[in-house]
């Protein structure tokens, strides 16, 4: 069918900030959609509040709105732009939800806008549990039995038909609260009552449990001619009970016979037809009983999903791109397969390798929450690895994770600790039964202590085929240890290494890294690498080609393996390798992928062949058409060296991908690899506290007083010299890992005994903590001669709150131009002193008009996309050109950037997903994503940022204030302002007495420990619309924890800093002064 | 892994060293690759692979073992089997024995642990050719000679090697027939896959399987409602007795040809067949029904194909016009035929799937319709 010509303009809705469950896969899908729709001549209007996306680059759409993704704001965009259609299926759940909202509010009808891809009816049928269930009944596809009940009596009457264990889900609760699994009637009664109580409509769903069943997913595509194809089958390593986002998954399905697979395929096709998703991709989940093959459909996502991104990268079939083309009327047979060129996209990919995805968790950031994995997703990112066998792929995936593991490390204290065999067994049993991020490694240990496959299966319900493969790896490790540990230990003195090359090859084919081999043989990674090179045990590269080599592949999308033939066919063009940023995690997310992609674009413009290395399937960088050549590989020294050996590039860029590639700078340089841009030597000066302090002295720049301690005693004496409070952290940090502010000796002792070990190898850095200082971020580019200042950003929250968690404003909203000039001056001095070639980010603190330099990062920072979007200059692109040797003077840089608007960045937090976690901010980064608010003044921009972050600021009602002593004075003007705007004030005793002393009318309420009804009761009763709560010290924080947690769960906006409260008051004022307007960024840049 | 060594040598001298899989010994055959990611049991038991050594492009094989239900024939007709990694461990509730044991029991010589992607690319680039697997002789030039001197598929009647010796009636073991014997169907066994018989039976036919050399007169005497020409191995152009049989049945009984049966029907109608460079073997081949323009994803397994006649998509035969009804979207080769004046149609692909998608299942209904 030809494409539709009745549609000219299409609105694409993005997915907003990165949150758990919705990550950069929707930037990947949205970017592909924008590109392919414009390719077809449509005018594309885009809305997304997340500036750190490629899709919101001004070149990607005709009109780009970085605005809150709410029906209210999108209505304004629709009114202004008058699109004929909305494509809602590529922006995750956010995009889909807001599309439903727009439809139900009659906005689409009002402006005559059509939903393409999936219609409202189909979306509702897929998303609504009971509608989905009856649809499945109509087509004879079975689903787990379930019944909605509104009373305990009703619940008791149906339990016989459901049976135990029974899943209880409370209706309309957030974050799965009120949900439980009951194994007996007593638990059942209890959980039903809890669920009914939690549910605002007093309703729970009782569902048959399929815990421990095998879990599968199919990625399905359909076109307007009703052609349906399955792109990929995915089998979960972790059985039902663990959210698929938190499961290790494998593609294609491994343990289904064709008969069973086809039954699933038939069901999937029936489902997509019955639900009525007209065009595009859907994801359908199935559970299979391992005892008898009984198959149930679990759920369907009528849109492109995280699994679609995985399926796209796993097969080479660009689901999002094709989905966009199908939405405008093309059919599958009319679209060519990019990779094979001469065959159509209407087929089902066949792959000849095994793909393993492992989720990346960040529980280290939230020590108060349990690490068990449930039906609620908790992972923050993922890695994918490709190998010719499952063993190879899982080994590569493990080392891609960057969690300090190089293989199946032992978790059990096998040698030491004096555990009896029985104790070990018992310990492992519990570790196998309860899924956690570490279960994979405990399976390895279980084999090591002699547990059998059946036994491990009985505890874990992980399919025996997977277990067998892990056993093979553990057995081979053992064989290597038995035969080569002694020899190599002995020869360690002369640093040589020896191993039978056939065994070595087998080890490599089993995915065992050089590092892990070194551990097994008590040798060194380098010794093994050299031995491998001498004996020609090298990896080869194979194509991901959608067709298992049936047709020739024209797109160099490659992975490594240890086999015979190599298909890499490197060119002789001038080329540069850009190392990506690996899995998303807190502190290193989509921002760095954004920078890598811009680096690729810029180098392409300069005529270089660009080569991308990355292992994160969610990203734009791992699209096969982003760079000229894509290596889907772990970002470790071993794997990167193999690629460099094959490609022989002019150099490697490490500064765009965050810490992951930066860590490789020095090791790569030692191996003779040219690092482009700022030299590893200068990077080291910036990162090494002592060398940096010397430089600062030489340049006569101010740093907070600081020191570096190699022992606990030394730490104490340094703290004494500097004076409390001090900021403590281990050297080389990412995202503020294990960073803490302590106020006295006792706090210091606690930190050193619990949080970190201090030793000469692991020194602890101690900084004077500047209380109440304003923190500033500056992003700049240097070519070694000239420095371009991209942006000076003022943080809203004071110094001491991690910069990634603090909101910030560009331009600054409170500091004067004199200080701004001083910040720029210092930035230039340091950039030139470090001979920075490329990007540099500096964090400053300003206290009493004195500027202190806190940290210098000679690399891409988290704020690069934000700055780029705010000022309309792609910082990463310019930097890439500078790295390639261009001079800033030749690049037409704007001399002085004066903005008409203000841009505010706000962080987005995952607290709701983690039970028992406090929402207080500190030096440890906790946010997963960010949004940008863009408007003519700070108040409005901040208000938009809050809206985008889903904190709905109230216009009226009651504000609850409870602040620590030192905040009691600064909170007075906030309270006054809120009072003026018509809010009522409620406060705890201490705060109330200070406020009433200032003639502020205030109602005093009880703290939680003071009795009832207390503040938590008031919040629960919807009597509070805004919470301002600061707390200091362990006791006070614990006492007020339930206030913050209750506000969070009830979605009441809350501020835990005075600075945040001040900004909120300004924003409310702006909101009340008139409605918000929308403006495309393309108009902002017209200077 | 079975550590006994094995070697694969192609007639052009390309050589792969790996490990023995299944039986030991030596075997020669034409090398083909199959891109199905599942369904190795059905592939192994498909009589159409007679004379061939099959390599699977999916590297992990044997994961779910071998079960009692999914066989497509009573024995294995292929010459050899090649995989990247055969699982010595099986995991599936229906599974009865390991793949390697199954191969051993059926005396199939195989090889594993080789770069099967390299082999596949080689076949793709240079076309299918003879190969030899050996676990006893490792002299490459001697093996190459043996491969070279082995007879190829062209001009060789493979049907007589796989067809049944005696006629038999088919009844599904697993399920009683709902409309017992609504239609009487004769299946010419050129190497029939059981799933064709299962499908016919479960859609209400009484199924009578005949050896390929049964003269058409005997069929007419049985007076069936329709005749199915089954799939099978090798070069259709030399199976002259079948071509004669078809000529004798055309216009007298509704005919449904599948795979080799389709090629034989084409030959009987005066069309020509030719050998493809490396054939179609897999479960992801897109085929367009030219009348509806809809695409079905099909299971295929053939080395020969029907030529598009020089005058185009309509062929004038002595039985009236013959229309090309289906095309393969990957290479635009003929996938289906229909006679306008007599009740006969055929497809190059496998509506019975097994292994592969069920998109073409409707063709059995179409056949039932033709018998009404």
Image (cartoon, coloured by chain):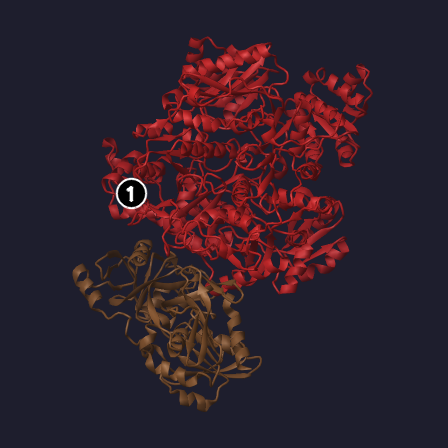
Chain colours: A red, B brown
Q: Please name whichever residue, A510 or A755, is drawn nearer the observer in this view of the structure.
A: A510
Q: Where is residue B251 drawn, in percent x and y?
A: 46, 84
Q: Please name whichever residue, A358 or A993, is drawn nearer the observer in this view of the structure.
A: A358
In the image, is residue B291 above or below residue A848? below
In the image, is residue A165 above or below residue A376? below
Examine the rendering and report whether any part of residue A211 can be seen: yes
Q: Please name whichever residue, B216 or A391, is drawn nearer the observer in this view of the structure.
A: B216
Q: Where is residue A590 drawn, in percent x and y?
A: 52, 35
Q: Residue furthest bottom?
A: B221
Q: Residues within 10 Å of mark 1 (few under 14, many from 20)?
A: some
The C terminus of chain A: image quadrant? top right
> A234 left or right of B165?
right
Q: Where is residue A968 drawn, in percent x and y?
A: 72, 17
Q: Secondary structure at mark 1?
A: loop
The N terminus of chain A: image quadrant? bottom right
Q: Chain of mark 1?
A: A
Q: Please name whichever residue, A935 or A124, is drawn nearer the observer in this view of the structure.
A: A935
> A947 left or right of B184?
right
Q: Where is residue A557 drawn, in percent x and y?
A: 39, 45
Residue at the (69%, 29%) spot, across then down = A1054
> A554 left or right of B26?
right
Q: Quadrant of residue A53?
A: top right
Q: Which residue matches tag 1?
A: A538
Examine the rendering and report whether any part of residue A703 can be seen: no
Residue at the (75%, 27%) spot, across then down = A1074
How many numbered dots are placed on residues in this image? 1
């Amino acid at each position: 069918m030809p494409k539709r010509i009745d549609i000219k303009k299409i609105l694409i809705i993005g997915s907003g900030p990165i949150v758990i469950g919705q990550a950069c896969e929707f930037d990947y899908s949205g970017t592909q959609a924008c590109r392919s729709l414009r390719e077809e001549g449509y005018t594309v209007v885009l809305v997304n509040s997340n500036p750190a996306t490629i899709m919101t680059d001004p070149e990607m759409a005709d009109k780009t709105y970085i605005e809150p993704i709410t029906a209210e704001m999108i209505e304004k965009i629709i009114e202004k732009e008058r699109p004929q259609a909305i494509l809602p299926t590529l922006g995750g759940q956010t995009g889909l939800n807001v599309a439903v909202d727009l439809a139900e509010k009659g906005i689409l009808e009002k402006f005559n806008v059509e939903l393409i891809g999936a219609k409202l009816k189909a979306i509702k049928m897929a998303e609504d549990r009971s509608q989905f269930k009856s649809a499945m009944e109509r087509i004879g596809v079975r689903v787990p039995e379930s019944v909605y009940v509104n009373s305990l009596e009703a619940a008791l009457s149906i339990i016989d038909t459901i049976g135990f264990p029974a899943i209880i889900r409370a209706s309309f609760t957030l974050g799965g609260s009120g949900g439980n699994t009951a194994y007996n009637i007593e638990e059942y009664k209890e959980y039903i009552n809890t669920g009914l109580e939690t549910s605002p409509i007093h309703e729970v769903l009782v569902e048959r449990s399929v815990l421990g069943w095998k879990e599968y997913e199919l990625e399905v595509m359909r076109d307007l001619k009703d052609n349906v194809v399955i792109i990929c089958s995915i089998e979960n390593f972790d059985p039902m009970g663990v959210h698929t986002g938190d499961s290790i998954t494998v593609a294609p399905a491994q343990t289904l016979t064709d008969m069973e697979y086809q039954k699933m395929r038939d069901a999937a096709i029936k489902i997509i037809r019955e639900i009525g998703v007209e065009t595009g991709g859907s994801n359908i989940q199935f559970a299979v009983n391992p005892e008898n093959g009984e198959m149930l459909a679990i759920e369907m996502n009528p849109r492109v999903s995280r699994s679609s991104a995985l399926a796209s990268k796993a097969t080479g079939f660009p689901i999002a791109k094709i989905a966009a083309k199908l939405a405008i009327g093309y059919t599958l047979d009319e679209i060519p397969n990019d990779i094979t060129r001469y065959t159509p996209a209407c087929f089902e990919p066949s792959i000849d390798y095994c793909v393993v995805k492992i989720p990346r968790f960040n529980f280290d950031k939230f020590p108060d929450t349990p690490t068990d994995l449930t039906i609620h997703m908790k992972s923050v990112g993922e890695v994918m690895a490709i190998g010719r066998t499952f063993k190879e792929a899982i080994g590569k995936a493990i080392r891609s994770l960057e969690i300090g593991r190089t293989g199946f490390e032992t978790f059990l204290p096998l040698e030491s600790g004096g555990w009896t065999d029985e104790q070990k067994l018992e310990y492992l049993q519990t570790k196998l039964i309860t899924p956690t991020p570490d279960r994979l490694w405990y399976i390895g240990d279980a084999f090591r202590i002699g547990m059998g496959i059946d036994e491990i299966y009985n505890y874990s319900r992980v399919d025996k085929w997977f277990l067998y493969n892990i056993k093979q790896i553990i057995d081979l490790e053992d064989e290597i240890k038995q035969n080569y540990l002694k020899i190599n230990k002995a020869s360690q003195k002369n640093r040589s290494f020896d191993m039978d090359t056939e065994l070595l090859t087998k080890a490599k084919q089993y995915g065992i890294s050089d590092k892990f081999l070194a551990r097994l043989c008590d040798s060194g990674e380098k010794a093994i690498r050299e031995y491998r090179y001498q004996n020609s045990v090298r990896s080869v590269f194979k194509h991901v080609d959608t067709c298992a080599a049936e047709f020739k592949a024209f797109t160099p999308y490659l992975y490594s393996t240890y086999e015979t033939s190599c298909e890499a066919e490197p060119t002789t063009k001038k080329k540069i390798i850009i190392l990506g940023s690996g899995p998303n995690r807190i502190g290193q997310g989509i921002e760095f992928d954004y920078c890598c992609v811009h680096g690729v674009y810029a180098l392409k413009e300069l005529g270089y062949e660009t080569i991308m290395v990355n292992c994160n399937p969610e990203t734009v960088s791992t699209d096969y058409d982003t760079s000229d050549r894509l290596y889907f590989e772990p970002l470790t020294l071993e794997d990167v060296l193999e690629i460099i050996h094959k490609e022989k590039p002019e150099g490697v860029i490490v500064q765009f991908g965050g810490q992951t590639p930066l860590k490789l700078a020095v090791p790569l340089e030692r191996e003779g690899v040219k690092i482009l841009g700022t030299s590893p030597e200068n990077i080291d000066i910036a990162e090494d506290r002592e060398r940096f302090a010397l430089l600062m002295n030489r340049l006569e720049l101010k740093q907070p007083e600081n020191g570096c301690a190699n022992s606990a005693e030394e730490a104490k004496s340094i703290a004494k010299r500097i004076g409390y409070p001090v900021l403590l952290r281990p050297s080389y940090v990412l995202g503020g890992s294990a960073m803490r502010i302590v106020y006295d000796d006792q706090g210091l002792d606690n930190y050193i005994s619990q949080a970190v070990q201090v030793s000469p190898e692991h020194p602890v850095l101690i900084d004077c903590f500047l209380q109440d200082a304003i923190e500033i971020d500056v992003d700049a580019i240097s070519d070694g001669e000239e420095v371009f200042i991209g942006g000076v950003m003022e943080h809203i929250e004071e110094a001491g709150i991690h910069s990634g968690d603090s909101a910030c404003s560009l331009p600054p909203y409170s500091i004067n131009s004199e200080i701004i000039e001083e910040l720029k001056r210092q930035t230039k001095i340091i950039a030139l002193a470090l001979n920075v070639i490329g990007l540099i980010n500096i964090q400053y603190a300003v206290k009493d008009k004195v500027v202190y330099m806190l940290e210098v990062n000679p690399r891409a920072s988290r704020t690069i996309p934000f700055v780029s979007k705010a000022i309309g200059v792609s910082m990463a692109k310019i930097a890439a050109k500078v790295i390639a040797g261009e001079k800033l003077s030749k690049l037409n840089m704007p001399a002085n950037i004066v903005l008409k608007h203000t841009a505010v960045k706000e962080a987005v937090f995952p607290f709701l997903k983690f039970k028992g976690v406090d929402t207080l901010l500190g030096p440890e980064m906790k946010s997963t994503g960010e949004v940008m608010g863009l408007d003519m003044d700070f108040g409005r921009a901040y208000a938009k940022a809050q809206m985008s972050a889903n904190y709905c600021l109230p216009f009226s009602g009651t504000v609850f204030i409870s602040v620590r002593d030192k905040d009691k004075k600064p909170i007075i003007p906030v309270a006054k302002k809120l009072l003026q705007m018509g809010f009522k004030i409620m406060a705890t005793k201490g705060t109330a007495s200070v406020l009433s002393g200032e003639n502020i009318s205030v109602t005093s309420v009880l703290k939680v420990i003071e009795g009832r009804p207390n503040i938590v009761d008031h919040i629960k009763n919807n009597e509070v619309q805004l919470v301002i709560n600061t707390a200091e010290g362990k006791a006070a924080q614990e006492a007020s924890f339930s206030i913050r947690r209750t506000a969070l769960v009830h979605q009441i906006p809350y501020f835990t800093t005075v600075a945040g409260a001040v900004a909120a008051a300004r924003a409310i004022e702006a909101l009340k002064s008139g409605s918000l307007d929308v403006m495309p960024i393309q108009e902002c840049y017209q200077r | 892994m079975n550590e006994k060594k094995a070697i694969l040598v192609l007639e052009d001298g390309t050589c792969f060293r790996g490990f023995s899989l299944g039986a030991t010994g030596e075997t020669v055959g034409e090398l083909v690759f199959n891109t199905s990611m599942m369904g190795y049991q059905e592939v192994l038991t498909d009589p159409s692979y007679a004379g061939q050594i099959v390599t699977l492009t999916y590297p992990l094989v044997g994961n779910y073992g071998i079960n009692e239900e999914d066989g497509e024939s009573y024995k294995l007709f292929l010459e050899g089997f090649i995989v990247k990694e055969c699982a010595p461990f099986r995991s599936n509730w229906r599974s009865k024995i390991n793949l390697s044991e199954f191969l051993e029991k059926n005396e199939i010589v195989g090889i594993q642990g080789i770069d099967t992607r390299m082999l596949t690319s080689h076949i793709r680039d240079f076309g299918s050719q003879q190969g030899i697997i050996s676990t006893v002789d490792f002299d490459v030039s001697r093996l190459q000679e043996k491969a070279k001197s082995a007879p190829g598929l062209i001009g060789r009647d493979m049907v007589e090697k796989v067809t049944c010796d005696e006629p038999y009636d088919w009844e599904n073991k697993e399920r009683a027939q709902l409309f017992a014997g609504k239609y009487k169907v004769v299946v010419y066994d050129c190497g029939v896959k059981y799933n064709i018989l299962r499908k016919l039976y479960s859609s209400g036919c009484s199924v009578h399987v005949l050896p390929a050399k049964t003269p058409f007169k005997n069929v007419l005497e049985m007076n069936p409602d329709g005749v199915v020409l089954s799939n099978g191995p090798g070069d259709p152009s030399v199976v002259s007795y079948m071509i004669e049989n078809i000529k004798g049945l055309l216009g007298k009984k509704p005919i449904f040809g599948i795979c080799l049966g389709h090629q034989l029907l084409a030959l009987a109608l005066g069309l020509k067949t030719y050998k493809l460079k490396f054939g179609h073997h897999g479960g992801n081949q897109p085929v367009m029904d030219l009348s509806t323009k809809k695409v079905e994803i099909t299971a295929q397994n053939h080395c020969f194909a029907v030529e598009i006649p020089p005058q185009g998509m309509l062929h004038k035969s002595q039985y009236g016009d013959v229309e090309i009804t289906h095309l393969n979207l990957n290479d635009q080769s003929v996938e289906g035929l229909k006679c306008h004046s007599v009740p006969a149609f055929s497809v190059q692909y496998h509506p019975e799937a097994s292994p592969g998608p069920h998109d073409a299942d409707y063709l059995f209904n179409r056949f039932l319709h033709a018998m009404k």
